[in-house]
Image (cartoon, grey):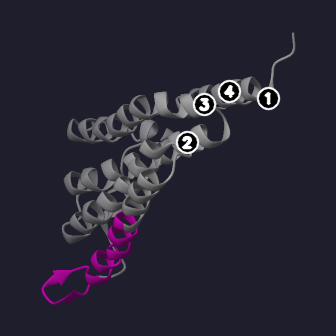
Amino acid sequence: HAMNTKDKKIVLLIIISFMTVCVLFCFPPIAQDVKYHKFADQRCIFGLPHFCDIVSNVPFILVGIIGMLLVITKRKHTREHIPYYAYFTFFLGVFFTGFGSAYYHYEPNNHTLLWDRIPMTIAFMGFLSLIIGEYIDRKGGVYLLVPLLIFGISSAVYWYLTEQVGTGDLRPYAVV
């Protein structure tokens, strides 16, 4: 019996995910380059170091708020089945990315970078879940949201913990 289109998409997604992980782990651990924390904008304006880097996060916060409000409004006014939780999670991640990135740019180091990366993984995994839900399988997108969030956040925490012991490893975060 031949596979239907949905099954083919699921198999392809699994194969690509598996191959990505396998290829990435053929390489040695990837530590965070300390030069990463050196920014082009070294100005201190209104008492804020790296002023433009910090202020450039305001649009993330605004887009996150607008997106979450639109998802809530759409959910209240339609019976159309869309993966609301994935959309909301994506915009929540975008919202918190604004704060996490501003915090990181205020005082750039590996500790504050963790708080920049965690919200980004929330947005990435919410986005992946909604793509799966919209284009492959609605229930699959919903069921995968929490495991994807756990994997995403864990990848950032794993990087941070490995940096703390001197063996930094960005590979799982790179997969995310």
Q: Is residue 148 visible?
A: yes
| Residue drawn at (26%, 60%) of the image | 100
Calculate the distance from the C-alpha at mark 4 to the C-alpha at mark 3: 11 Å
Kindly give the residue lying farthest to the left in the view shown. Answer: 47
| Front residue of this view, candidates 81 and 118 | 81
Query: Reading the chain from its start, which is encountered first: label 4 or label 3?
Result: 4
Q: Which residue in the protein does label 4 denote?
A: 10
Number of the label disc, if any, that sits on residue 17: 3
| Front residue of this view, candidates 52 and 70 | 70
Number of the label disc, if any, that sits on residue 5: 1
| Residue drawn at (20%, 71%) of the image | 106
**Cβ–Cβ under 8 Å for marks 2 and 4:** no
Left or right of residue 5: residue 109: left
Query: Reading the chain from its start, which is encountered first: label 4 or label 1?
Result: 1
116 relative to 16, above or below: below
Per the image, label 4 sits on a secondary structure element best described as helix
Q: Three-letter amino acid code at disc 3?
A: Ser
Q: Three-letter amino acid code at disc 4?
A: Ile
Q: Three-letter amino acid code at disc 1?
A: Thr
Left or right of residue 2: residue 63: left
Calculate the distance from the C-alpha at mark 2 to the C-alpha at mark 3: 27 Å
Calculate the distance from the C-alpha at mark 3 to the C-alpha at mark 1: 18 Å
Query: Reading the chain from its start, which is encountered first: label 2 or label 4?
Result: 4
**Cβ–Cβ under 8 Å for marks 3 and 1:** no
- Residue 168, x across and y down, in percent: 33, 40
Between tags 2 and 4, which lies in front? 2
Between tags 3 and 1, which lies in front? 1
What span is colored magenta in the figure?
42-65
Corner quadrant of residue 24 = top right
